Image (cartoon, helix red, strand yellow):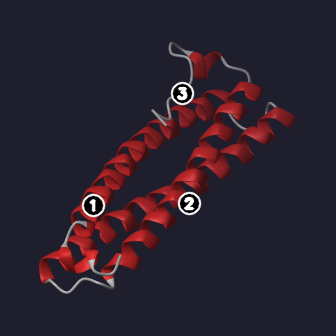
Amino acid sequence: MKDFQSRPRDNFIMKADWKQLYALTEHWQSDLTFHRDEIKFLFHMVNKYILWLTRYEEVEMVRKIRKKLAVVRDESLELLGKVETHMGHLSDLMENPFAHDSHTFRTEHEQLEVELAVFAKHFRLAKKETFKVMESLMDSKEVEEHL
């Protein structure tokens, strides 16, 4: 995934119809659900290898990774909740155009898109760091004996 800003540039959010915005929001929801599952996998991987570690330095590296993953997990769950709420508002607008203020909703949509882009960066960084630490741990003699 490159970025959550997968919409056309220019003034798309202010000009798009509700169905287009709904499709974009569904895409966000799908990506966040995928990331949630990927974070679960990363936690599982880290938890599996921590059992074999005995050196303090290695255990500390894993603890730091687990903290970063927990922050990213919490961020993803918060955003998933916001996206689901946003989809509800969008559904309301599709049924009744006067349910919410259109301009306010579109501004909130833009802000949510920015938050998702920031999350994507945090997620990629946490994933990269996790794999880097896990690779170094798997190369250690301690873990190698258990593989």
- Label annotation for residue 37: 2
What residue occupies the far top of the structure in this picture? 10
Q: Quadrant of residue 20?
A: top right
Identify the amino acid type marked 2.
Asp
Q: Position of residue 101 (x, y in %)?
A: 68, 33
Is residue 96 at least partly visible in the picture? no
| Residue position for label 1 | 135
Q: Are marks 2 and 3 in contact (CB under 8 Å)?
A: no
Q: Position of residue 55 (x, y in %)?
A: 15, 83
Q: Relative to the observer, which residue lies in front, 36 or 76?
A: 36
Q: Is residue 94 visible?
A: yes
Secondary structure of residue under mark 3: loop
Residue tagged 3: 6
Label 1 and label 3: CA atoms lie apart by: 32 Å
Q: Horizontal placement of 128 versus 25: left or right?
A: left
- Amino acid at the residue labelled 3: Ser
Q: Residue at x 35, y 49 (%)?
A: 122
Residue sitting at 46 percent across and 72 percent down? 44
Q: Residue at x 47, y 61 (%)?
A: 39
Residue 103 higher or lower than 49, as above or below: above
Badge 2 marks a residue whose secondary structure is helix
The quadrant of the rendering that contains the C terminus is bottom left
Dot 1, how many residues are within 10 Å of its Cα: few (below 14), some (14-19), or many (20+)? Answer: few
Image quadrant assignment for residue 21: top right
Q: Earlier in the sequence, mark 2 or mark 3?
A: 3
Which residue appears at 56% of the width and 17% of the height?
8
User: Counting residues from the N terminus, which is met first, the one under dot 1 or under dot 3?
Assistant: 3
- Viewed as shown, does residue 44 lie left or right of 57? right
Determine the secondary structure under disc 1.
Answer: helix
- Closer to the camera in the image, 133 or 33: 133
